[in-house]
Image (cartoon, rainbow, N blue to C red):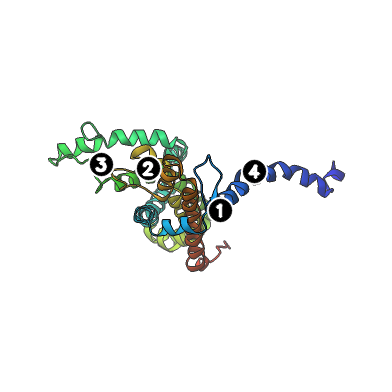
Amino acid sequence: MNKALRTPWTYVLFLLPVVVLYVLFFIYPMFAAFAKAFTKWNGIEPAQFNGLKNFKNALTDEKLWASVKNNGYFILFSVFVQVPIIVFFSLLISNVKKLKGLYKTAVFVPAVMSTAVIGILWSFIYEPDIGLFNLILTKLGFNPVMWLSDSSWAMFSILITNAWQWTGFYIVMVLAAILAIPKEINEAATVDGASSFRRATSITVPLIMPIISVVIMLSIAGAMKAADIVIVMTRGGPGGATDVMATYMIKYGITNIKYGYGNAIAVLIFVFTLILTVLYQLLLARRIERVEYS
């Protein structure tokens, strides 16, 4: 057995199936998408090379830029609203003395639920006549709101639903980082007379900044590929008001049978996501020092 483990070919044999699957389902489709992005193709007839025409059309397409703006809303909401909520509830749960496991499980449940189920569930909550939110508004004397059919509210409604689904997942990540902080640090601060708020802001949050940075980066990447929750709840409506880049790509790539143009949009999504993550790493993430506990 030891002799087999010392042979490099043993490791190659174990890695080969993974590498084959990775190339087959990730590398090949990615390069195929890049190649088709420079063609006019309807999925049936042979693809015709048309140079940069698809990209030129995409970059001058007002509807595409409207969907890019909606992706921006996803990013802004995730970073400036969702992340502070994640940190707040993580700090709250970390200080719970009893039933901590129950709270962790409860907040994590939405993350393991199907997006289709969550979309349908929240569609009932947003329902104009019998939805929970409108029932509350009516009881308070306000007029009902068309949450998903009014372009002024539809995007905000989807952002709330998306945040509800993924907040618990990130809370568990941040909570794990908080619980990994040596107890002696907080105990020493308590002896010195530091309040709970002071310990949270001056000790806990600075020590978990690396994991918060990861959460922000994952939120940005997730915001750029958001599609399923939009498709389930509004299908990009009303009038394209909730379309994001991925749903707009699906409309052109599948519904309108313009696969070349759809692949061009897919490439743009990849490029925009790459630019955002690289900028975040260069401008912000690298400033966060590596945490070492002494």
Question: What separation in Å lies between label 3 and label 2 (alpha carbons)?
Answer: 13 Å
- Checking the image for residue 157, the label placed there is none
Q: Callout 4, which amino acid?
A: Leu
In the rendered image, which residue does mark 1 sit on?
Answer: 34
Q: Nearer the viewer, mark 2 or mark 1?
A: 1
Q: Callout 2, which amino acid?
A: Val
In the rendered image, which residue does mark 2 sit on?
Answer: 230
- Chain-order first, disc 2 or disc 1: 1
Q: Is residue 30 visible?
A: yes
- Indicate the position of residue 58 as horizontal and vertical percent values: 42, 56
Q: Callout 3, which amino acid?
A: Trp
In the rendered image, which residue does mark 3 sit on?
Answer: 147
- Indicate the position of residue 273 as horizontal and vertical percent values: 48, 57
User: In the displayed image of the protein, which residue is found farthest to the left?
Assistant: 141
Residue visible at 82% across and 47% down in the picture: 9
Q: Nearer the viewer, residue 275 or 97?
A: 275
Question: What separation in Å lies between label 4 and label 3 (alpha carbons)?
Answer: 42 Å
Question: What separation in Å lies between label 4 and label 2 (alpha carbons)?
Answer: 28 Å
- Indicate the position of residue 182 as horizontal and vertical percent values: 54, 55
